[in-house]
Amino acid sequence: MDYIVKTYNLTKDFNNFRALDNVNITINKGDIYGLVGENGAGKSTLIRLISGLMIPTSGSIDLQNLGGFGSLSAIVESPALHPSCSAVMNLKLQCDLLGIKNCNDRIEKVLEIVGLQDLINNNKKVKHFSLGMKQRLAIAMALISNPKFIILDEPMNGLDPLGIMQMRELFIELNQNHNITFFISSHILSELDKVATKYGFISRGKLLLEISADEIHKSNKTIEEFYLGVIGGIQYAQHPKS
Amino acid sequence: MRNILKADFRKYFNGKLFIATIILLVVFTALNAVINYFLKLNNEYTYFINPLTFLEQSFSPTQDFGILYLIFMIVILVSDFNHNTIRNKIIIGYDRNTIYLSTLIFTLTTTVISFLVYSLLNFLFAGLIFGFKGIKAIKVVETLLMYVCALIFYYCLVQLMVFLTRSTIGSIGIMIGLSFLIIIIISSVFTSAKLNDTTIKSLKYVIIFIPVLRLMIPTIGGRLPGLEFTGFNAVLSIFVSLVVSGILVFVGLYLNKKLDYN
């Protein structure tokens, strides 16, 4: 299968702390790749490295199959939005950055995809939006360049149950109907279980295992049980007395 | 780069700070004109007031329009970090040099235009009140070029501080702190040292090689006798300002490549 992103011995040090240790991951085209790990495991560092926000200490990232400018979109931590602008103005600014001309039709289309069509003729400023609306607008901004690959860092954080459900349906729709590959980090395993086609388990900066969702299902274990088995085994090996 | 500039200018012209800048510009120009009118009316200090003084003082980053503009510009630049929109540029695929340089072009364009308008209006009103007698056009152009180049240096430093600290309070603190420190040092030099020919000659070279001093001198002493720059010294001053600004830009580009965006 064609990969869209591959990392080779990716390592990131912060002073004397090794946040990521020789990580090799492969994200194939069409995957919804769920990156799972405890707080401080290195998920956000890996996402920032792949997004280009951080410089690796060593190792490399192969994005050759990704395509050119605008093929990658990412929502890292909080959405990158201009709070004192409207939704449409934010999208226009994104069009400017991407060099897209006459983008009004495209703006309407992406707002419809994320369910924010009510904002097309609405000048409400983003600072007055709910978190769920901001997340959906951020995804609309990510979609405006017709990306092949979207990275999401804890996209369900702070969302209410309805917002989580809508997000999940949106990811599946975009993956299946728009051929967008996703790389999602989360510690809400039950939510990832409903969307992910492949998993990467990360702990203390090390990638412990990459496995397809099908293989987990075949093992007759829930994702939580599988994750605890992987993490627990490692933790036991490192601290046998505990 | 053109696309980033288009987005940055669209955001700026749609923002409140652009309108606030225009209001400040009009208010301070009017205030200066009114004060000058009353000075003229009461015949106070008019023996040393020269429209060129107002042209030079308009560029000061620690006075009226200058200090508020500095704060506004830092707020605008840091907002790109606070709202994570600078990350967006990297994720889309722009390289860090392009981002740094386009931000610099935006900063310098808006700053130079704002200060040119403000200084020329002040010069014009001061001239209308006190007269333009004895002021040559070449001297005005020379002065403008020297001060614009010093301003370019100052705002190259502002952007570097913003990219390093990514904090509004931090950047404002450093820039205003640095500016006032320089004013205190220059003031003590002028008040304690005997301004003989050798001292003035040495000061001239210090001012030439530290462009930020040029912006501060009018703040403390107006047009000090013997410290006027013409001909070769003016050209040297402009050249040095541009070279030092270039060095600052290279330092900024180098550091920006090494830094992580959290």
Image: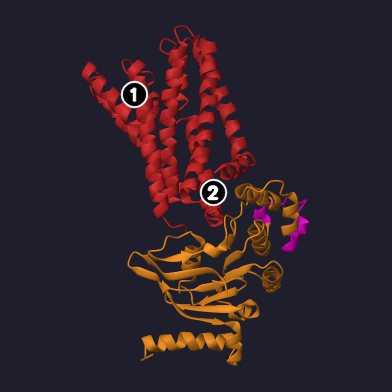
Chain colours: A orange, B red
Q: Which of the numbered marks, if any, corresponds to residue B236?
A: 1
Residue underneath mark 2? B79
Q: Is residue A124 magenta?
A: yes
Residue range of the region highlighted in magenta in the rendering = A111-128
Kind of residue sitting beneath label 1: Leu
Q: Is residue B178 above or below residue A225?
A: above
Q: Is residue A159 above or below residue B252?
A: below
Relative depth, front residue between B195 and B107 = B107
Q: Is residue A13 left or right of residue A164?
A: left
Image quadrant containing the N terminus of chain A: bottom right
**Given the image, what chain letter belongs to the residue carrying mark 2?**
B
Element marked by disc 1: helix
The location of residue B141, given as percent across then percent down, is 46, 18
Residue A75 visible, this orientation:
no
Displayed quadrant of residue A165: bottom right
Badge 1 local density, few (<14 within 10 Å), some, or many (20+)? some
The location of residue B175, given as percent across then percent down, is 41, 40
The location of residue B126, given as percent across then percent down, is 51, 15
Which numbered disc, 2 or 1, marks the residue that appears first in the sequence? 2
**Given the image, what chain letter belongs to the residue carrying mark 1?**
B
Kind of residue sitting beneath label 2: Ser
Image quadrant containing the C terminus of chain A: bottom left
